[in-house]
Amino acid sequence: GENVEQHPSTLSVQEGDSAVIKCTYSDSASNYFPWYKQELGKRPQLIIDIRSNVGEKKDQRIAVTLNKTAKHFSLHITETQPEDSAVYFCAAIDGSQGNLIFGKGTKLSVKP
Amino acid sequence: NAGVMQNPRHLVRRRGQEARLRCSPMKGHSHVYWYRQLPEEGLKFMVYLQKENIIDESGMPKERFSAEFPKEGPSILRIQQVVRGDSAAYFCASSPPYTDTQYFGPGTRLTVL
């Protein structure tokens, strides 16, 4: 089955800097990779996703890149703001079943 | 269009009692997924259901846990004879047919005393 590794587990940046979170996956059949943001005590919220027929996708300050050959994908947040502070989870769809396999999360802290 | 609804939001049970968690998917969504999140950890898949069918329950413990998604009404995750290790946040997510995008509910935080 699918396995997703996520790094780093914690990330601290200054407001205005960029943040990058990286994930690798194991199942070459996976074709859908969402990113979720979870604030303390709240539900995971989908912030961006990418499918395997696309190499990069951007939505304002957030972008995701996918390297199918290397089986890794990354989240890029530019011009970070304090409200970006949260735990971010990457996920990959289990190619054979349809459920999501999540990374262990990255706690992002943006210092004003 | 209301989002995914879960209730109760908080549930306290004593060891040995039963816990019933309910999830109402978004309108038009026929797929429901349940995930468990331990403190400071990621989300672990438990079970995937469509109306009246369990599609994949490979992440759900074989004993004490069961799930259903009836033709009418919410999806139910049932935990019998709860133990302290069952304390966690339980999230459900729903998706419409023919799409991978999953939207999460607010979760039920189960505490077992």
Image (tube, rainbow, N blue to C red):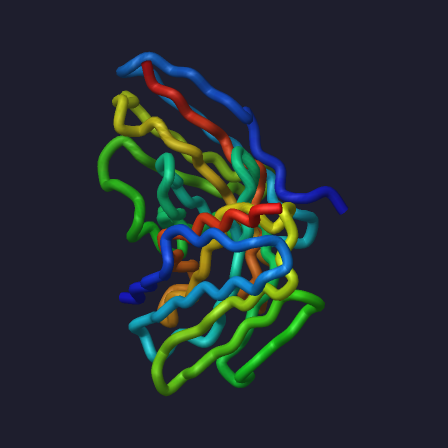
Residue B96 appearing in the image: no
Query: Which quarter shows the N terminus of chain A?
Result: bottom left
Horizontal arrangement in the rendering, residue A98 relative to residue A27 (left or right): right
Furthest toward the right, the residue is B1
Q: Residue at x 61, y 45 (%)?
A: B25
Image height check: is B8 above or below A79? Answer: above
Horizontal arrangement in the rendering, residue B113 relative to residue B23 (left or right): left
User: Exactly how many numbered labels are in the figure?
Assistant: 0
Relative image position of residue A24 (x, y in whole percent)? 35, 70
Q: Nearer the viewer, residue A26 or A40?
A: A40
Image height check: is B89 above or below B99? Answer: above
Image height check: is B3 above or below B29? Answer: above
Q: Residue at x 49, y 30 (%)?
A: B108
Relative image position of residue B33 (x, y in whole percent)? 47, 49
Q: Residue at x 39, y 21 (%)?
A: B111
Which picture quadrant has residue B23?
A: top right
Residue A56 appearing in the image: yes
Relative image position of residue A6 (x, y in whole percent)? 36, 61
Q: Nearer the viewer, residue A80 or B14?
A: A80
Q: Nearer the viewer, residue A37 or A29?
A: A37
Q: Residue at x 76, y 47 (%)?
A: B1
Furthest toward the left, the residue is B63
Relative image position of residue A82 (x, y in whole percent)? 63, 47
Q: Nearer the viewer, residue A42 or B17?
A: A42
